[in-house]
Image (tube, rainbow, N blue to C red):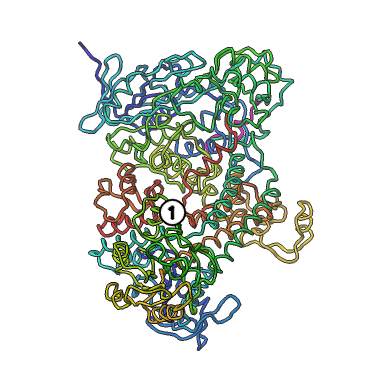
């Protein structure tokens, strides 16, 4: 069975907290070779020459040989590891950013990003997990994939999605054109087409390069702690967003129900990245648009990493508050007793009792109490109470890897053209690029090519 | 009433391109075989285009030949023009296409059939399948005859409830006015077979004496003809060839079509069947590609025995008067006399997901099918399936291993896998773009890929097989030698480089490196390769291709390794997908409907995600189905 997997996978295998220490795991036949490509031992020795079950001290280095992190590396040889394969576990100290950079180096060195649940799958198929656990293993694979799929497409930014789609459209058109000519050489000619194709391929490469850079800057999908602001209409949620982001992002009025869709902003609070979402106030509403907004607010609250529950201190709690408390009861939450600049009719103690969450009094309008809020968030994070959804970062790395694959494929097309290969060779790697980009969107090839050929080109007897 | 009652091993229904291959394969394997046809005079009839092969279809013919089928030999003996298409492209897309003498093609195949031992030809319409306890045990004919059989192969082509249509005219006949089969569909439905209705069409034929060829471009055959069959002596196919002719439609043609669209049965709703997008009628082309102001038209001879010519590119189902006017606008056809009108034909066929990759019905044992009945189109696609269906019908009753070719070893594998795992909404045509490993599936190496299977099945004799093994050895040895032969910057070497406009050498270099240069190949390096052994042309060709495209070929071979692992994971026939926890509902439904044979096939079914495949893999492992 061990030979079933001939590739080596890598992933971050601890939750993404700020706790500083995390593990990046590599598993597969080439685990040692790949780790050696990014690792520099203090004693200068190669990992591949070391004994099993040993721990080594050294550094992970980047492309230019710069040190990314100081690490401890543990070696396990097949079959004596979790997955039953050669495994390297890298203990990193430099926090989330360092872990991500290390993983990226491993991918450049020849590892493939692990699919959701893949370590478990390999462990099972290599006989390291008891047969009686099969059902649990299947559950893990299916649940993790479903989650990853959801987060990957949902969190891909609209503009990025659009750009990838447009590159794919261009590629499939070119593939279809060349293929239809190969299929029907007496109707369509592609003789010397390389010349025309070359700038198109270079343009696509350029666009993909830009996407890779934006992935590096974390702009491709939103990372950070998903922080959702909830509360009744007119509790001051939008004011809070504006105060925290230092910008007038959300429209603030005295009219309850002003925010009808979700307003999103990435902010930095004392070195911690928050993805802040301002939502529609939750109440029974007759207005359909507002109702949709409220529905979205509920959904976002459900998969938030942190909830900021804004309570209007100048008005008594009512059934809408009851509902919100119900909604957030299993969530990490900070309650903000707002409008301290007005006369309060709610006690902080009562709120604390009801919500079992820290309560901070603020005035979003007067910018009071915000410091305390920021400090509270920072503390929660560094005490490890808050972590963000690691699937998001992993998704980002997977996307980037797919983009790099697409770029590689296009470079190969370029080479084929420059080497004077016949036109039918171009489509092999154009297809590779098309498929790699499709993985980001969660789309498989299916009958796309055949459909494109038939719809765009007139062939046949 | 006395009824004829007979016993056979194999019954084949239909004697078209699929039926002929199925019947010949069965009889050649020594099984008593009867082949039914509605007309003995129409054995291996080519009712549409007068050619065999073409892009990717030429590959199929080569593969049929490598497995021991007849199509390649038949066209080699009866062609009147031949061309290797895409010669300026890479070897993967070189494709042979030959114009056939239709009548000779059909007559030769009939002679072969008639003179094959164990093969009985019978003119009769099969009306019923006999199915007992889910096993097909024979057929009944219109005359009341009962033919018991151990296995039945359906190759009914376009004949089931066939209807030919042009304009307001609609005839319930098969092609060329041949009798259609009007009962069998009902019997199939009774036994739970899901039928669909497809459509295709053919252009008019004109009298060659009335065509003005001076207004057309002549299309010659190749100077040196390459045979289809690996068994044909290349010298035997160097014959005098006839020409085809190229002309174009024009705005006037399109105007006539546009003005009469309301009279087309396609647009008036009279035709319900689903037609293929890849061979659109001329009215379809004019509507869908309105920006094109002309379309190519090829005049192709139907044979040496007749003046009739096929008007390639202008199939139609418009009324006779519109056809007349439209064809006459084409340069060279101004005064052409139309011998046969263009028409569309509708027919019953099956949704092929009801078949296993062996081409046996999932729900009816010992019933196999091939050809257009399975929702494909084209003579070559039909013959390929007929051959596999025939072989597997034999394997089944002999208790031997089935022949299932996979996507990494043949176009036939791609064809059948697509049919049984993808949703087909139109007659399926082979295309090179459907083969993901096409650099490996070349027409030049079909023998190296498939002869062994033909031999294993029993259709390729020992002598032929030994010759193949010798060829393999020679190729291997020569690649090894060339990889390890170095040349320096001597004068003869540099002169040869100059001759081919290739960069001069600075230092020593292996012959392989030189072969990889686009402007060079194995053959042209002969003068500087002193110890080159004398090798047959086909061996030299393999050496050249394998070295030249080594990088690409190795990459595809690596992909194939992974592919093979998934194909190797068998899924038990009786697996209850509902019992596999954690599969998504959509996946369960699809898997239950398609019942894939292995994990690879499962992964190609739309609606089955990679995660579902992982779950299945874990399940199979946990229940001990290790494949």
A23 to the left or right of B186 = right
> What chain is tagged by disc 1?
B
Between A9 and B449, the one lying in front of the other is A9
The reply to whether the magenta stretch includes residue A233 is: no
> Does any portion of residue A307 appear in the rendered image?
no
Measuring from the top left, give residue B570's x and y in whole percent: 32, 51
Residue furthest bottom as drawn: A43
Instruction: Determine whether the residue tagged by mark 1 lies in a helix, strand or loop.
Output: helix
- Residue B86, image quadrant: top right
Between B341 and B30, the one lying in front of the other is B341
Q: Magenta region's main secondary structure?
A: loop
Measuring from the top left, give residue B244's x and y in whole percent: 65, 25
Quadrant of image for the N terminus of chain A: bottom left
Q: Is residue B208 depicted above or below A79 in this figure?
A: above
Quadrant of image for the C terminus of chain A: top right
Measuring from the top left, give residue B464's x and y in whole percent: 47, 41
Q: The magenta stretch spans which residues? A: B229-241
Between B141 and A91, the one lying in front of the other is A91
Q: Which residue is mark 1?
A: B563
- Residue B304, image quadrant: top right
């Amino acid at each position: 069975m061990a030979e079933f997997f001939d590739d080596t996978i890598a992933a971050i295998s601890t939750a993404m907290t700020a706790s500083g220490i995390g593990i990046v795991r590599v598993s597969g036949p080439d685990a040692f070779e790949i780790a050696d490509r990014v690792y520099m031992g203090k004693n200068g020795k190669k990992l591949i020459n070391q004994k099993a079950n040993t721990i080594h001290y050294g550094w992970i280095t980047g492309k230019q040989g710069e040190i990314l992190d100081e690490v401890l590396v543990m070696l396990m040889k097949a079959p004596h590891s979790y997955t039953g394969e050669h495994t390297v576990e890298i203990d990193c100290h430099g926090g989330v950013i360092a872990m991500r950079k290390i993983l990226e180096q491993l991918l450049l060195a020849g590892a493939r990003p692990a699919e959701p649940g893949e370590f478990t799958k390999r462990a099972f198929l290599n006989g390291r997990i008891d047969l009686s656990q099969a059902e649990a293993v299947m559950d893990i694979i299916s649940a993790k994939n479903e989650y990853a799929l959801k987060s990957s497409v949902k969190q891909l930014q609209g503009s990025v999605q659009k750009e990838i789609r447009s590159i794919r459209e261009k590629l499939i058109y070119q593939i279809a054109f060349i293929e239809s000519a190969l299929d029907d050489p007496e109707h369509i000619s592609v003789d010397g087409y390389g010349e025309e194709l070359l700038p198109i391929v270079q343009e696509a490469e350029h666009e993909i390069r830009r996407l890779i850079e934006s992935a590096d800057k974390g702009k491709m999908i939103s990372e950070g702690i998903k922080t959702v602001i909830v509360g009744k209409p007119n509790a001051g949620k939008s004011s809070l967003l504006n105060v925290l982001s230092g910008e007038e992002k959300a429209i603030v009025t005295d009219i309850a129900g002003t925010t009808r869709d979700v307003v999103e902003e990435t902010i930095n609070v004392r070195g911690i990245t928050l993805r802040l979402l301002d939502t529609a106030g939750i109440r029974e509403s007759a207005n359909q648009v507002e109702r949709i907004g409220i529905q979205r607010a509920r959904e976002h609250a459900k998969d938030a990493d942190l909830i900021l529950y804004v309570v209007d201190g100048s008005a008594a709690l009512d059934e809408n508050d009851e509902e919100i408390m119900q909604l957030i009861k299993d969530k990490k939450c900070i309650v903000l007793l707002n409008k301290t600049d007005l006369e309060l009719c709610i006690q902080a103690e009562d709120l604390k009792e009801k919500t079992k969450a820290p309560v901070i009094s603020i005035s979003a309008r007067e910018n009071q109490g915000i410091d305390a809020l920021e400090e509270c968030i920072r503390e929660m994070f560094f005490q490890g109470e808050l972590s963000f959804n690691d699937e998001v970062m992993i998704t980002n790395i997977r996307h980037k890897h797919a983009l790099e694959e697409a770029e590689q494929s296009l470079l190969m097309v370029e080479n084929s053209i420059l080497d004077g290969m016949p036109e039918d060779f171009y489509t092999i790697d154009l297809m590779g690029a098309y498929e790699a980009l499709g993985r980001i969107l969660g789309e498989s090839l299916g009958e796309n090519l055949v459909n494109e050929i038939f719809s765009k080109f007139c062939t046949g007897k | 009433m006395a009824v004829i009652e007979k016993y056979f091993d194999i019954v084949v229904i239909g004697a078209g391109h699929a039926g002929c291959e199925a019947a010949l394969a069965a009889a050649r394997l020594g099984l008593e075989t009867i082949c039914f046809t509605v007309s003995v005079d129409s054995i291996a009839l080519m009712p549409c285009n007068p050619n065999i092969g073409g892009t990717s279809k030429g590959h199929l013919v080569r593969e049929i030949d490598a497995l021991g089928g007849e199509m390649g030999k038949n066209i080699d003996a009866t062609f009147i023009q031949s061309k290797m298409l895409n010669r300026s492209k890479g070897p993967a897309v070189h494709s042979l296409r030959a114009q056939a003498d239709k009548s000779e093609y059909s007559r030769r195949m009939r002679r072969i059939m008639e003179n094959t031992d164990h093969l009985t030809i019978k003119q009769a319409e099969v009306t019923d399948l006999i199915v007992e306890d889910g096993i097909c045990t024979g057929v009944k004919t219109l005359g009341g005859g009962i033919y018991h059989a151990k296995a039945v192969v359906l190759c009914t082509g376009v004949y089931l409830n066939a209807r030919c249509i042009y304009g307001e005219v609609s005839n319930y006949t098969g092609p060329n006015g041949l009798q259609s089969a009007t009962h069998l569909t009902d019997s199939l439905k009774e036994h739970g077979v899901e039928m669909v209705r497809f459509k295709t069409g053919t252009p008019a034929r004109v009298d060659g004496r009335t065509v003005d060829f001076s207004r057309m471009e002549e299309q010659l055959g190749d100077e040196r003809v390459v045979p289809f069959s690996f068994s044909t002596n290349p010298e035997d196919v160097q014959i005098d060839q006839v020409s085809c002719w190229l002309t174009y439609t024009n705005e006037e043609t399109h105007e006539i079509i546009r003005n009469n669209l309301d009279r087309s049965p396609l647009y008036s709703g009279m035709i319900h069947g689903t037609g293929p997008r890849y061979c659109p009628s001329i009215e379809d082309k004019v509507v869908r590609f309105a920006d094109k102001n002309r379309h190519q038209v090829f005049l192709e001879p139907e044979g040496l025995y007749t003046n009739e010519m096929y008007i390639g590119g202008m199939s139609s189902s418009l009324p006779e008067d519109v056809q007349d006017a439209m064809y006459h606008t084409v340069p060279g056809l101004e005064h052409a006399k139309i011998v046969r009108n263009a028409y569309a034909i509708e027919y019953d066929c099956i949704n092929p997901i009801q078949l296993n990759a062996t081409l046996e019905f999932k729900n009816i044992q010992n019933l196999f099918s091939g050809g257009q009945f399975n929702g494909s189109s084209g003579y070559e696609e039909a013959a390929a399936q007929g051959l596999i269906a025939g072989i597997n019908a034999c394997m089944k009753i002999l208790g031997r291993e089935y022949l299932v070719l996979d996507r990494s070893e043949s176009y036939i594998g791609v064809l059948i896998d697509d049919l049984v795992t993808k949703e087909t909404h139109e007659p399926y045509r082979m295309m090179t773009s459907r083969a993901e490993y096409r650099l490996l599936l070349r027409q030049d190496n079909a023998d190296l890929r498939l002869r062994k299977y033909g031999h294993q099945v029993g259709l390729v004799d020992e002598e032929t097989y030994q010759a193949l093994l010798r060829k393999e050895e020679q190729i291997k040895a020569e690649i090894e030698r060339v990889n390890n032969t170095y040349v320096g910057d001597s004068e003869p070497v540099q002169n040869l480089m100059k001759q081919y406009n290739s960069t001069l050498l600075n230092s020593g270099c292996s012959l392989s490196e030189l072969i990889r240069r686009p402007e060079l190949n194995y053959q042209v390096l002969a003068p500087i390769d002193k110890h080159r052994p004398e090798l047959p042309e086909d061996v030299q060709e393999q050496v050249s291709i394998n070295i030249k495209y080594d990088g690409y070929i190795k990459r595809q071979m690596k992909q194939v390794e992974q592919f093979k692992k998934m194909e190797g994971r068998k899924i038990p026939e009786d697996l209850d997908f509902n019992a596999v926890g954690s599969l998504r509902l959509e996946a369960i439904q699809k898997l239950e409907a398609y019942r894939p044979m292995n994990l690879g096939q499962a992964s190609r079914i739309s609606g089955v995600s990679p995660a579902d495949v992982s779950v299945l893999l874990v399940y199979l492992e946990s229940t001990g189905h290790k494949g």
